[in-house]
Amino acid sequence: MGMGVKVKVWGKYALFSRPEMKVERCSYDVMTPSAARGILEAIYWHPGMRWIIDKIYVKNPIRFTSVRRNEVKSKISANNVLQVYNGAEKPLYISSKEEIVQRASLLLTDVEYIIEAHFEMTDQANETDNPGKFKDIIMRRLKKGACFHTPYFGCREFPAYFCLCEDEEIETVYDEIPEKDLGFMLYDMDYTDKENIQPMFFRAVMKRGVLDLRDCEVIR
């Protein structure tokens, strides 16, 4: 077991997109493990270590709100950028009204979670890297509120605020509810084959407001 840490995260909105809902964006009921990992990596990342999410505690009631957001239908292709860079006379920005569509998004509102996680050393670690050193840096960064980039809840436009959680016992808003089955949920992406990155899913069962990810079965 690597070295553990608990981080409190909260924010006004969150969108943990369900991959099966392509057009109308729709959030899962709770934060996905990959989104939790993304938040921790925004606070501290190093090639010599890897974050592993153990538990997600749901502190606020699960509440949805529908918002219409402007989205761009197409991305500027890298090919286009290269051609312009090499002197082609082409527009490089997306401006036409046809390119911008309003889509309804089903967002979570007023979210707060505690992420309980640990890290393991990777083979990219060098001689001076050790768990104690990483733990010290992580604790310092959490206490100062330092991050590499602003962590976010699923989408960059929904920032996540964070601080160190020092509570021994964590209460959730669903303490009284023994079990709530949230169905299949995105666990993380499998990067073993860089050419073919695959999503991995798990059966999300919230027990007394806690998603325990320590030995969940991952389905590819």
Image: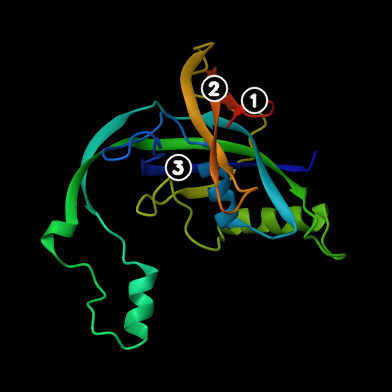
Residue neighbourhood size for the residue with mark 3, other residues' Cα within 10 Å, grouped as few (<14), some (14–19), many (≥20): many
Quarter of the image with the C terminus in it = top right
Give how far across and how far down residue 102 sits, in percent: 17, 48
Q: Is 107 drawn above or below residue 193 in the view shown?
A: above
Residue corresponding to mark 1 = 216
The numbered dot on residue 75 is none
Q: Position of residue 165 (x, y in %)?
A: 60, 41
Q: Nearer the viewer, residue 123 or 119?
A: 123
Badge 1 marks a residue whose secondary structure is loop
Residue 124 drawn above or below residue 216: below
Q: Is residue 52 visible?
A: yes
Q: Residues within 10 Å of mark 2 (few under 14, many from 20)?
A: some
Task: Name the spot of residue 100 as percent of width and height, x first.
Answer: 18, 56
Of the numbered discs in the image, which one, if any, rests on residue 10?
Answer: 3
Q: Secondary structure at mark 3?
A: strand
| Residue 106, quarter of the rendered image | top left
Q: Amino acid at mark 3?
A: Trp
First in residue order: circle 2 vs circle 3 = 3
Left or right relative to 17: residue 92:
left
